[in-house]
Image (cartoon, rainbow, N blue to C red):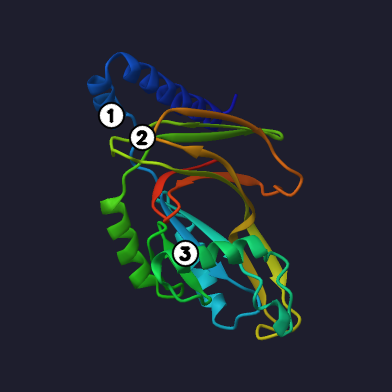
């Protein structure tokens, strides 16, 4: 067993022990939750809606690449398909990712554009504005609340565990996201013709697994054929966008 696997098993076991304690002593369990590393210090979720057909997107892709190396965020690149008709079909684009961006727009009154960075499901900005992104990450970290969560993968089998938060009425949808750490494309036509761009944390699929109602939840799933990303993320999010849990495989 690798050191990484050992750490993951410890985190999972710690979360399970916390939930068992909660049944016997809710007040004491809440104190234990705050003492477990990572239980409430979840990453801030960053979602960049981008496209290979958009000439203003490469600077934002570079910003996401820098942010993806940080441990306090989960930075994901969602490639949208509404630029595909203008001369270059983005091989990483999906209608599902476009639909996710439009859902944010409806929920919050955002405009839909690229490159658009959505921070923790709540605020949006031009993705190339690094300083503003830093400010929004700090603000999101200060207001976040979280349920403990873990996710692990063994071949096609995925196991996830969710705890509970102290926030009354917390509820959300459980999403499984597969993504590749790095993918490159030489773009041959369209606004970025002639460029070779290396993209970070490219989302390949997103699927709703379950609903969560602020109670411990264990999930055991098999990956679908299109869930081909080398890494997996678990995101628990209210329909209005509020994020409750974020976890990712190593």
Q: Which mark is residue 35?
A: 1
Q: Which mark is residue 39?
A: 2
> Toward the viewer: 193 or 99?
99
Which residue was labeled with disc 3? 104
Relative to 196, residue 234 above or below: above
- Residue in the picture at 49% in, 65% down: 64
CB atoms of marks 2 and 1 within 8 Å:
yes
Looking at the image, the residue that sits furthest to the top is 24
Relative to 85, residue 180 above or below: above
Q: CA distance from mark 3 to mark 2?
A: 27 Å
Q: Secondary structure at mark 3?
A: helix
Question: Is 73 displayed left or right of 222 in the figure?
Answer: left
> Toward the viewer: 42 or 21?
21
| Quadrant occupied by the C terminus | top right
CB atoms of marks 3 and 2 within 8 Å:
no
Question: Is 227 displayed left or right of 125 in the figure?
Answer: right
- Residue in the picture at 72% in, 81% down: 85
Mark in front: 3 vs 2: 3
CB atoms of marks 1 and 3 within 8 Å:
no
Question: Splitting the image into 4 quarters, where does residue 14 fall?
Answer: top left
Q: Secondary structure at mark 1?
A: helix
Mark in front: 1 vs 3: 3
Q: Going from the N terminus, do you reach mark 3 or mark 2 first?
A: 2
Crowding around mark 3 (Cα neighbors within 10 Å: few <14, some 14 to 19, many 20+) is many
Q: Which mark is residue 12?
A: none
Q: CA distance from mark 1 to mark 3?
A: 34 Å
Residue 50, position in %: x, y?
A: 57, 71
Residue 163, position in %: x, y?
A: 41, 31
- Residue in the picture at 46% in, 67% down: 106
Residue 116, position in %: x, y?
A: 48, 72
Q: Going from the N terminus, do you reach mark 1 or mark 3 first?
A: 1
Question: Is 239 displayed left or right of 56 in the figure?
Answer: left
């Amino acid at each position: 067993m690798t050191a990484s696997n050992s750490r993951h098993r410890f985190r999972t076991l710690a979360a399970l022990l916390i939930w068992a304690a909660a049944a016997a002593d809710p007040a004491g369990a809440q104190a234990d939750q705050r003492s477990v590393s990572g239980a409430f210090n979840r990453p801030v979720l960053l979602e960049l809606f981008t496209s290979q057909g958009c000439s203003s997107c490469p600077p934002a892709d570079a910003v996401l690449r820098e942010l993806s190396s940080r441990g306090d965020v989960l930075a994901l690149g969602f490639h949208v398909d509404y630029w595909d008709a203008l001369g270059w079909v983005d091989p990483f684009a999906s209608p599902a990712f476009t639909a996710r961006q439009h859902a944010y727009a409806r929920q919050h009154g955002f405009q839909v554009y690229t490159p658009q960075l959505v921070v923790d499901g709540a605020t949006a900005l031009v993705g190339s504005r690094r300083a503003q992104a830093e400010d929004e990450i700090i603000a999101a970290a200060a207001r976040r609340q979280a349920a403990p969560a873990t996710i692990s993968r063994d071949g096609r089998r995925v196991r996830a565990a969710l705890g509970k938060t102290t926030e009354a009425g917390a509820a959300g949808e459980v999403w499984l996201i597969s993504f590749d750490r790095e993918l490159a494309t030489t773009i041959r036509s369209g606004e970025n013709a002639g460029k070779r761009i290396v993209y970070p944390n490219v989302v390949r699929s997103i699927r709703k697994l379950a609903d969560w109602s602020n109670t411990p939840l264990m999930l055991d799933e098999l990956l679908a054929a299109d869930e081909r990303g080398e890494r997996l993320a678990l995101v628990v999010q209210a329909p209005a966008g509020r994020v409750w849990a974020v976890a990712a495989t190593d």
